[in-house]
Image (cartoon, rainbow, N blue to C red):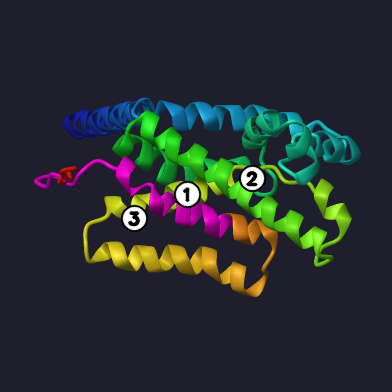
Amino acid sequence: MRIFRGVAGAVAGAAGAVRAAGSAAGSAAVSYVRSAPGTYLWLAALFVTAVAMHHMSPEFEDEFLRQRSTNIHELSHNPVRVLISSALWIDGGTWLSYALLYSVFHASAERWLRTGRWLAVAALAHVLATLISEGVLALAIHHGAAPRSAANTLDVGVSYALAGVVAVLTYRIPAPWRYGYLLAVLAVYGTPLITGRTFTDLGHFTAVLIGLACHPLTPPRPGRVRRSRRT
């Protein structure tokens, strides 16, 4: 009987430990999500639109997304609408893969920069990289280096904003690891630009440069105060 009571006590103790660990993990997850509200609200919106896309026919989906694309045609007629709506749809990849990327990069950046500055970096990367890459595409069409049909191409997604945020996180990493991270980022986004040379490759690399240019939006490192210049 003592053996049975001992086994029962051990099982009860293990079950209690598992429940406590699960409760702690759940609390940590909730705390992490609350620390990056913008990231997870955006991710929730992407989940809703991903589910909506799953119920569309291929023909309807293509036309639906084309009307929300940041292509030359739509930017010429509805620039504000498509710049906002294009960031609410996923073109390629799965929602789960974006959930992982958002949790690793966007959430980290939002917790570090705070929501306002994180959103500013993401918006600047998304908007400016879109305008610059589409501007280059328009020049290519004008000079005959790209077909006129490219003005109405399908171009939605959140990858420019992600690239900008990935780049600005360079300043979050202490030296000398920062330089290895920066080289990796430049290699990941620069290699397709060299080998593929599409307007989206240009957009991604431009977004990286914009993210790196957002250094003034980053908080000073602990123990270091930025100097202000006298005028």
Question: Vertically, is 220 above or below 32?
Answer: below
Of the residues tagged 1 and 2, which is closer to the observer? Answer: 1
Residue 100, position as x, y percentages in the image? 49, 45
To which quarter of the image does residue 179 belong?
Answer: bottom left
Q: Is residue 220 magenta?
A: yes
Q: Can the viewer see residue 42?
A: yes
- In magenta, the rendered stretch is 204-226
Question: Vertically, is 156 above or below 163?
Answer: above
Q: Are marks 1 and 2 in contact (CB under 8 Å)?
A: no
To which quarter of the image does residue 9 belong?
Answer: top left
Q: Can the viewer see residue 97?
A: no
- Give the residue at x 42% y 46%: 105
Q: Identify residue for label 2.
A: 94
Structural distance between the alpha carbons of marks 1 and 2 = 20 Å
Q: Is residue 77 magenta?
A: no
Q: Looking at the rendered structure, which numbered label has been put on residue 182?
A: none
Query: Looking at the image, is mark 1 or mark 3 earlier in the sequence?
Result: 1
Q: Identify residue for label 1.
A: 164
Q: Identify residue for label 3.
A: 170
Residue 198, position as x, y percentages in the image? 69, 63
In the image, taking residue 20 as reference, residue 26 lies left or right, namely right
Taking the view exactly as shown, the residue that stands out farthest to the right is 59
Query: Looking at the image, is mark 1 or mark 2 earlier in the sequence?
Result: 2
- Give the residue at x 19% y 32%: 6
In the image, taking residue 80 as reference, residue 226 lies left or right, namely left
Taking the view exactly as shown, the residue that stands out farthest to the bottom is 195
Tell me the element at label 2: loop
Tell me the element at label 3: helix
